[in-house]
Amino acid sequence: MSLIDWQAKWIWNEGEESPRNQWWMFRKRFDITSREWGSAKLSITADSRYVLYINGKQVGRGPVRSWPSEQAFDTYEVGHLLKAGQENVISVLVMHFGTTNFCYVRGRGGLLAQLDILQNDKVLQSVRSDNSWKTAQYQAQDTRSPRISCQLPFTENIDGRLIEAEWVEVNYDDIRWEQAVEIGSVGMEPWTSLVPSEIPFLTEEPIQPTRVTSLKKVKGITWSTNIELRNHMQLESTNHANKVGFVGYIATIIRMESTAKVMLGFVYSTRNFGLCSIDGKHYHPHQFLAKGQEKYLELELTAGDHLFMMDVTDIDHGDGFHMGIDSEANVEIVSPIEHESPFITIGPFMTKEYINDEPHRNPFEKFRDPNSNDPIVRDFQGVLTISSIHELDRFKEWIRPIPLPLVSRADVFAHSIWNREEIATPVPTSFNEAIATAATPAIVPKYEDYDTQFIVDFGKEYSGFLEFEIEAAAGTVVDFYGFEYMNGDYRQEMYRMDNTLRYVTRNGYQKYISNVRRGLRYVMVTVRNMNSPVKIHRLRMIQSNYPVSEIGQFVSSDPLLNDIWEISRHTTKLCMEDTFVDCPTFEQTYWVGDSRNEALINYYLFGSLDIVKRCLKLVPPSKEVTPLYMSQVPSGWNNVIPNWTFFWAIACKEYYDQTEDIDFVQDMWPKVKYTLDYYLTHLNKDDLFSISAWNLLDWAPMDQPNEGVVTHQNMFLAKTLKEASTLADIAGDLQAKVDYEQAYSSLKAAINKALWSNEKNAYSDCIKRNGELSETYSMQTQVVAYVCDITDGERKKIIENYLVNPPSDFVQIGSPFISFFYYEALTKAGKHSFMLDDIRKNYGVMIEYGATTCWEMYPQRIGDEIDPRNLTRSHCHAWSAAPGYFLGKYVLGVSSAAPGWKKVIINPQPGDLDWAKGAVPLPNGGVVQVEWRKNDKQFTLHVDAPEEVEIEIKAPVDYELILN
C-alpha cells in the first residue's frame, strides 16, 4: 500500500498547546483478531520528536526535520513485533520543544499514529490515534533543563527515581493516566500536509570506549544556574530563532548564612556580561579573573542579604546566562521581590528583533550617553545607583520576575568545568579495562569527602545517543559532559554549547538510553553523592547516521594522504544525519551552502542520492520567509547568505549531472527560477549585484560588508546564472535559457569593468560606500573569479599565477571550506601537484594533532607557531572534508563525462606519488575501480567498470600508458 488512508486523529493532552520542553508518554493497548497477515505498517509523526515502541521493543526515532506545512512522517513494518491472538501495545514518547531553533519551527504539541494490519493490500485491522489512547507526562525529564544552544533544543536532566521503565510494556497499569485529547484531523494547522520520509532510517550502532584518560577526586561548586534571558526579554522569541537585542539588568539576592569568601563565576561571559553591582559597589568586567571564556570574581560577603545586579544589555541569540557561586558557607539565592523565582530583570528598557537580511544597526548606544534627557535612558542609568533591596521600588514599573521554567535548577556544564578542588589520581587498570570492554562491571573509585570524576575516550569522534547501565543507591548524581578535544592537561571546553546529561539514580540496577542526539569524542563522567559503591555495567555511544556503504576507497604510496582521506570519510559520515549537517556536535544544522560541497564529497565516498535530493527539496519552502531563500532550513532563524542560495542552485545542476534525473529538474526548475529572478531585482545601475544580507564566504579578514557590492557574490551569481541557463534548457524553458545566458554575460562584463584594479592586477573584494574599490584584495576573491570563469585572456593568466604564487599582501585562504574552491581552481588550471602539497600542509597539521575528523578552521598561530590551544572551534566539520572528493576525482582520476555517469573519463594525476588505487561509486550501482603505478616514464593502469559504462582513458602527461 503506497498511500496512507489517514483515519487517525492528531492527539495531545489537556495541558498547554505548546509547552516548553515537555515529554509526554502515549499508549494504546489492542487485541489482534487475525491469526495471519501479510504485513503490518505503522505510520507515525509527532511534534516535535518521538521514540516509538511496540510491545516494549524500540522501533525507531523521528520524524526527520521538516517544515510544519510539509510535516514528515515515517512508516515502519512492525508485523514481526505483533502477537496474534494476544493483547499488544503501542507506546510513544513525544518530546515537544515548545521553542523554535535551527532544526525545528515551532508548531504545537501533537502525535499522529496509524497501524494498518494488511493482507494483500486489504486492511484487516487498523489502530489509530484518537481519544481512546492514554497519556501521561514523563516526569523524569526536568522541564527546567536549559537549552543546549541557540541551534538546538534542551539538555537532558533525568531523575531515574521517576522513571517507570515498564510503561512501554503490555502489562503496565496505566489506570492513572489521562485520556488523550483529539485536537484535529490530518490537514489541520500547522501540519497542513503530510509528506512521507524519503530517506532510510538512521543507523544505531553501539560503540565502546577505548580507554579512561584521567581520574580525579573533586569538590564541586555550591550552586549554579543557566537562565534563558532572550526568551524572557522578548516573550515571542519562542516563535523564532532570530537574534534579540535588549537593554536591562538581571538581579537576585545572595543570602549568606555567615561571613565568608565567595567566588562568583560566569562560565560563558562573551554575551550578557556587563557592569556588575553588589550592594551598590561596582565591578567592571576587567576586574574579573578571566579563564578562556569564563570570568570569576572573588570577594568576601558578610552574613545576611546582598543585592546582586548585572547589566545584561546585549544582542542575544539564545546562549543563556550562566552564573555560579562557590563558598564554604551556606548560600541561598532568593528573589528580591518575594517571588518563587529567585531572579528578576529590571527592564527590558528596549528590545529589538534582528532579521538577518536587514541592515544591522545598534539602537542601544543612546543608553550609554551620560547626557541623555530621554526618561527611559535616565531610568536605565539610574538602576546602578541602587545599593539595597529597598531602593528597587523606584523602578517597580520595570521589574519582572524571570519565570521559573527559564531558570535551570543547575548548570551541569558549569559543574563539569568548574570545581573548587581537583586532585588527579592514577587510573586503576581494572577500572580502565572494565569501562573499555564492559566484560565486568567497573566499580567507580570512591573518595572520602570528594566526588569522583573521570574522562572516557571513544578513540574517535562519534555522534548519536549515550547509553549506560549503572548500579547505584538512590539519589546518586551522575553528570555526563561530552567534548571533542583534549591534549594532556588541556581540555577544549564546549562554550556556547551545553553538551551535558544529568542522571539521578534510583536504587539498584538501571539502564538509560539518551533521547538527545550529541556529538563527542570524550565524555567526562562525574559521580556525586556516592554514599555506596557505584558499578558501571556499560557505557557506550549509539552511533547514529544516514546509512551508507563505504563504497569509495582510496589508498596510495603516501601514508599521510591515506590518513587524510580516512578522516575526510569519517567526517562526512558523521555529518550525514536526516540531512547533511555542518557538524554533529555544536549546531547539527542543515546549512544550505555547506551541503553543496558535502554532496560532491558524498558522491565520491558513498554515492548516496536520496539524502542529496531531500536536502535540495527542503530549501524552496523557505520562500514563505524570504524569496531569497534561507541559509539553513528548516529553521526559525531568518538568515540569508546569498552565496548559500547560489550554491544550492548549482547543486541542483550537479545533482542532475550525477543522476540524469529529468523529473527532478522539472520539479525544481520553477523554484530555482523563482529565487534567481528575485536576486536579479537587486542589480544596481551598474548592473552589479548589491544587497543587504550576511555576505559571507570565509572567516578570514576579507572585506565582505553586509551591505552593497561584494565581489565574490557577484561572481558566484554569474556562475549560478550560467548553470541555471542549462537547467532551463533541460526543463524546456527556452526563454529563460536565453534570458539567463544574457544575464550571465552582462554580469560578467560588469564585474570585469567595475571590480578589477589595473593598479593591483586583481579583483578588489568589494565596492565601498563611497563608490571606490576596497583596498582589500584576497586570494578568496581571485580563486572565485577563476572557478566562476570570470577571467579571460591576460587576466586569466595573472590569476593562474596567483593560484601558485599568492601575493603576500593579499588576504590568504582562511578555512578548509575555501580550500575546496581553491582546489577546484588548482585542478582546473592543471596545478594538481600544488593541490596535493596544500592538502598535506593544511590537513597534515590536523593529523599531527591527533584529529580523527576534519576541523572547521585552520589553527590560529602565534607568530609562526601554531597555537595548540586555538586549533579550531568544531573538530568535525563536513565543509572541510574536501580531500575525500579531490583525491578520488584527480589522483585516481575518475570523473563523469556525461549526465548519469554514462561515460567516465579516467585521467589520473599522480604528482609525486608512486602508486594509488581505489574505487568510486556510480549513481546507478556498481563502482569504477582504478589501480595505477608509475615507474620511470611508464604508467601502468588497471580499470574495472560495469560494461554499460563507456570508459575513456587519458594518460598523464609525459608518461607512456600501459593498460593492465
Image: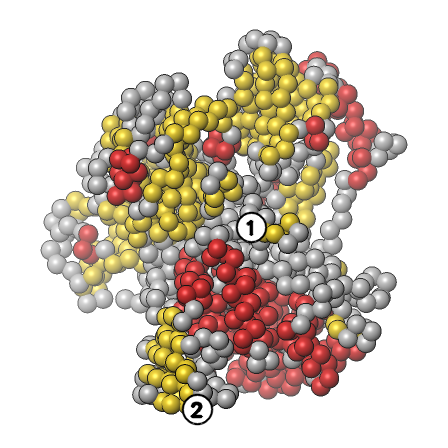
Where disc 2 sits, the SS reads: strand
Picture quadrant where residue 251 is located: top right
Q: Nearer the viewer, mark 1 or mark 2?
A: 2
At 80% from the left and 32% from the top, the residue drawn is 377
Where disc 1 sits, the SS reads: loop
Left or right placement of residue 59 versus residue 879 in this view? left
Q: What's under tag 1, amino acid-wise? A: Leu
Q: Quadrant of the C terminus?
A: bottom left
Picture quadrant where residue 475 is located: top left
In the rendering, at what x and y percent does residue 198 appear? 38, 64
Q: Which residue is mark 2?
A: 960
Using the image, tell me which numbered label, if any, was put on residue 871: 1
Residue 621 versus residue 467: which sits nearer the camera? Answer: 467
Residue 40 versus residue 23: which sits nearer the camera? Answer: 23
- In this view of the protein, can residue 630 be seen by the observer? no
Residue 158 versus residue 772: which sits nearer the camera? Answer: 772
Q: What's under tag 2, amino acid-wise? A: Glu
At 84% from the left and 66% from the top, the residue drawn is 772
**10 Å crowding of disc 2: few (<14), some (14-19), many (20+):** some
In the rendering, at what x and y percent does residue 169 appear? 22, 40
